[in-house]
Image: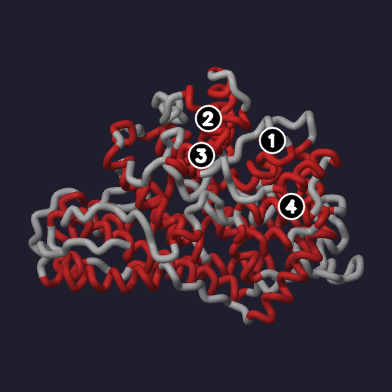
C-alpha cells in the first residue's frame, strides 16, 4: 500500500494514523479465533459432510432448506427497517454539546479534532456484546439436542415439526429430546438475524460518533460496506471486502449518479445486504459450533462476533475520518491483495458494489462494455492470441459436453487452469454434487441464469471460473470472464462478480460479436489480446 503524506497532521492525529496503519496490518491478516480445537472442528466437519450426503437423499431435506430460506427472507423485511430507525442522533449530539462543542447535527462532529471525539466516544462494543450473548444463549436452549440432524433431516428423515435425534442415532433415538426441524431452523435464523441487527446498529452508532450520519443514503451504503468487512471471517474475504468498501467510497465521491440515490433504492440495497449478512452469520454459526451448539457456545459466539464488529467499525470509521479530514483518498490495494482480486469470489463474498449498481440500473444509462479499440482490429488480434496452454482444459470441457456433466478430475482441471488457488476447495467437493450441478448447467433446456447459479453452488467456483467451465464445454457460445477482457471493454475489475453481471457480459459479447460479424470466441480472443498488448499506464 502506498504511503501517504501526513505532513499536515497535528501530532495527535499523526500518532493515531500510525496506530491505524499497525491495526490495518493486524486486522487484514488476523485469523478469526475458533471456539473449538482444530481436531474437534475437523471431526465436526467430517460428521457434517456425512450428514449432508445422507440428508439430501431423505424425505424432508428440501423442505428444511426452504424453511431456512423463507425465514431469512422474512427476517429481512422487518429487522432492517428497525435497525435504520432505532438510533437516537439527538442523544449523541447532546453528549458533544454537554462538553461545550458547537455541534447541532451529526455531521458537525467531523469538524472537531480527533482528540475531542476520543474524549466523548464510548466503547460501544461492550454494550452490544451483552445483548448478543443473551440471544445466543436463547438459541442454544432451542437448538441443543437437535444438532446437525435436525437441520438436515438425517435421523428419522422427518418433515417440519417432527422430533429429531442426533447425528448417527438409530431411528427414534432421542426423539423426545430433540426439537423439530422448524424449531431449530427458526432459532438458528432468528439468532443470526438478531446478531445482524445488533451489528448493523452498532455500526450506525459508531459512524455517528465520527460524524457520519446513517440517515443519509450514501452513509447507509458506507455502513453496509463496513459491515461486510466486519463480519468477514477469513483473510481473503476480509481483504476483498476492505477493497470493496474503498471502491464503494470512491464511487460515492466520484459518481454523480450515486450522489442522487433515493431512499427507496437504498432501502432495497440494505435489505439485500441484511439478508446476505444473516445467511453469512448462519453459516458461521453452523461451521463453528454445530453439533455442539450448547448454551455457553451459542452465547460466546455472538459476543465474539459483536466484539469483532465493534473493533472493525471503529477502525474503519476512524480511518475514514482521518482520510476525509486530510484528503488522503482511498485505498487501492492491501497486503496480499493480489491473491484475491483476480475476480474469483470466495464462498463468503458479498458483492456490495454490484448490488448497488444493479439497483441503479433502471435509473442510470448502461455505459458498460464498450470496445476500447477499432473493431476492424478484432480478426488480427484474435489471430495473435496466445494464452497459457489450455489443451487439458479444452479436452476436459469437450468430454463433459459429450457426457452431459463434468467429473471431479475434469472440474479440477478446468478450475485449476482458471484459478490455481481454487483447487483445494474443488477437490473436496463430493462427486455426486459435481455431477448434479454440472449436469443442470450443461442441460440444453437450462436458461443462462440457472446455468451460472448451478455452477456457483459448488464450493470454490465463482462466476469467472464458472464461465471457464461453460466456455470449454461450448467454446463458440461462451466467453471467459477475465480482467483483461473487461479492460478491453472499459470495465474496471472488481473483487467479485454477480450472476447478473455475467448475464449482461454474456449479452454484450453476443451483441458485439453479431454487430461486427465475428464469433463470440473470436471476440473473446481479441479482447484478451488487446489488453495484453496494451502498453501499461495507457
Q: Quadrant of residue 5?
A: bottom left
- Position of the N terminus by quadrant: bottom left
10 Å crowding of disc 1: few (<14), some (14-19), many (20+): some
Q: Are marks 3 and 1 in contact (CB under 8 Å)?
A: no
Disc 3 to disc 1, how far (Cα)? 17 Å
Question: In terms of sequence position, does the residue under pointer 3 or pointer 4 come before the other?
Answer: 4
State the mark number for residue 380: 2
Q: Is residue 251 above or below residue 56?
A: above
Q: Nearer the viewer, residue 347 or 89?
A: 347
Task: Tell me which residue sits at (36%, 62%) in the image.
Answer: 313
Q: Position of residue 106 (x, y in %)?
A: 21, 51
Q: Which label's residue is closer to the chain start, 2 or 1?
A: 2
Q: Position of residue 298 (x, y in %)?
A: 59, 71
Task: Say which element carries label 1.
Answer: loop
Give the mark toward the camera: 3 or 1. Answer: 3
Q: Is residue 146 visible?
A: no
Q: Counting other residues with Cα less than 10 Å from the Cα at mark 4, is it few (<14), some (14-19), or many (20 or more)?
A: many
Q: Is residue 463 above or below residue 367?
A: below
Which is more N-terminal, label 4 or label 2?
2
The reply to whether discs 3 and 2 touch (Cβ–Cβ < 8 Å) is no
Disc number placed over residue 411 in the picture, else none: 4
* Residue 399 placement (x, y as % from top left): 82, 44
| Occupied quadrant, residue 506 | top right
Judging by the rendered image, the residue that carries numbered circle 3 is 529
Q: Residue furthest right?
A: 171
Q: Which mark is residue 475?
A: 1
Amino acid at each position: 500500500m502506498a504511503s501517504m503524506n501526513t505532513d499536515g497532521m497535528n501530532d495527535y492525529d499523526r500518532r493515531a494514523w500510525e496506530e491505524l496503519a499497525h491495526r490495518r496490518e493486524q486486522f487484514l491478516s488476523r485469523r478469526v479465533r475458533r471456539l473449538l480445537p482444530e481436531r474437534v472442528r475437523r471431526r465436526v466437519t467430517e460428521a457434517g459432510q456425512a450428514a449432508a450426503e445422507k440428508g439430501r437423499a431423505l424425505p424432508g431435506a428440501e423442505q428444511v432448506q426452504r424453511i431456512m430460506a423463507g425465514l431469512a427472507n422474512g427476517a429481512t423485511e422487518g429487522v432492517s427497517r428497525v435497525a435504520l430507525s432505532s438510533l437516537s442522533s439527538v442523544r449523541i449530539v447532546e453528549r458533544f454539546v454537554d462538553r461545550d462543542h458547537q455541534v447541532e447535527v451529526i455531521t458537525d462532529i467531523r469538524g472537531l479534532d480527533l482528540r475531542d471525539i476520543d474524549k466523548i466516544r464510548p466503547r460501544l462494543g461492550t454494550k452490544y456484546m451483552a445483548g448478543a450473548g443473551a440471544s445466543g444463549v436463547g438459541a442454544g436452549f432451542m437448538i441443543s439436542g437437535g444438532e446437525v440432524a435436525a437441520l438436515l433431516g438425517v435421523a428419522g428423515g422427518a418433515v417440519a415439526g417432527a422430533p429429531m435425534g442426533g447425528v448417527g442415532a438409530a431411528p427414534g433415538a432421542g426423539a423426545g429430546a430433540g426439537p423439530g426441524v422448524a424449531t431449530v431452523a427458526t432459532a438458528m435464523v432468528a439468532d443470526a438475524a438478531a446478531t445482524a441487527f445488533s451489528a448493523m446498529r452498532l455500526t450506525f452508532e459508531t459512524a455517528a460518533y465520527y460524524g457520519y450520519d446513517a440517515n443519509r443514503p450514501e452513509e447507509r451504503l458506507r455502513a453496509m460496506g463496513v459491515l461486510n468487512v466486519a463480519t468477514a471471517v477469513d483473510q481473503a474475504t476480509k481483504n476483498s471486502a476492505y477493497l470493496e468498501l474503498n471502491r464503494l467510497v470512491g464511487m460515492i465521491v466520484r459518481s454523480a449518479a450515486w450522489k442522487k440515490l433515493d431512499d427507496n433504492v437504498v432501502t432495497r440495497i440494505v435489505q439485500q445486504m441484511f439478508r446476505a449478512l444473516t445467511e453469512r452469520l448462519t453459516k458461521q454459526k453452523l461451521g463453528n459450533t454445530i453439533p455442539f451448539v450448547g448454551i455457553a457456545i451459542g452465547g460466546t459466539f455472538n459476543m465474539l462476533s459483536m466484539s469483532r464488529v465493534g473493533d472493525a467499525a471503529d477502525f474503519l470509521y476512524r480511518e475514514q475520518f482521518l482520510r476525509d479530514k486530510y484528503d488522503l483518498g482511498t485505498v487501492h490495494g492491501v497486503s496480499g491483495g493480489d491473491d484475491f482480486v483476480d475476480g474469483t469470489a470466495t464462498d463468503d463474498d458479498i458483492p456490495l458494489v454490484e448490488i448497488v449498481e444493479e439497483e441503479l440500473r433502471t435509473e442510470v444509462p448502461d455505459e458498460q462494455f464498450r470496445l476500447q479499440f477499432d473493431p476492424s482490429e478484432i480478426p488480427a488480434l484474435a489471430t495473435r492470441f496466445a494464452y497459457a496452454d489450455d489443451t487439458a482444459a479444452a479436452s476436459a470441457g469437450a468430454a463433459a459436453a459429450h457426457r452431459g456433466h463434468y467429473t471431479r478430475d475434469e472440474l479440477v482441471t478446468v478450475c485449476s487452469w482458471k484459478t490455481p488457488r481454487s483447487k483445494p476447495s474443488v477437490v473436496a467437493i463430493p462427486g455426486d454434487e459435481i455431477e448434479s450441478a454440472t449436469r443442470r448447467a450443461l442441460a440444453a433446456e437450462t436458461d443462462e441464469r440457472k446455468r451460472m447459479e448451478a455452477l456457483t453452488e459448488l464450493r470454490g467456483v465463482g462466476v469467472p471460473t464458472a464461465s471457464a467451465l461453460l466456455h470449454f464445454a461450448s467454446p463458440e457460445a461462451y466467453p471467459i470472464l477475465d480482467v483483461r477482457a473487461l479492460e478491453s471493454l472499459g470495465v474496471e475489475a472488481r473483487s467479485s462478480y454477480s450472476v447478473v453481471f455475467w448475464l449482461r457480459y454474456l449479452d454484450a459479447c453476443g451483441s458485439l460479436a453479431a454487430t461486427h460479424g465475428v464469433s463470440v470466441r473470436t471476440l473473446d480472443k481479441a479482447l484478451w489480446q488487446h489488453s495484453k498488448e496494451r502498453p501499461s499506464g495507457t
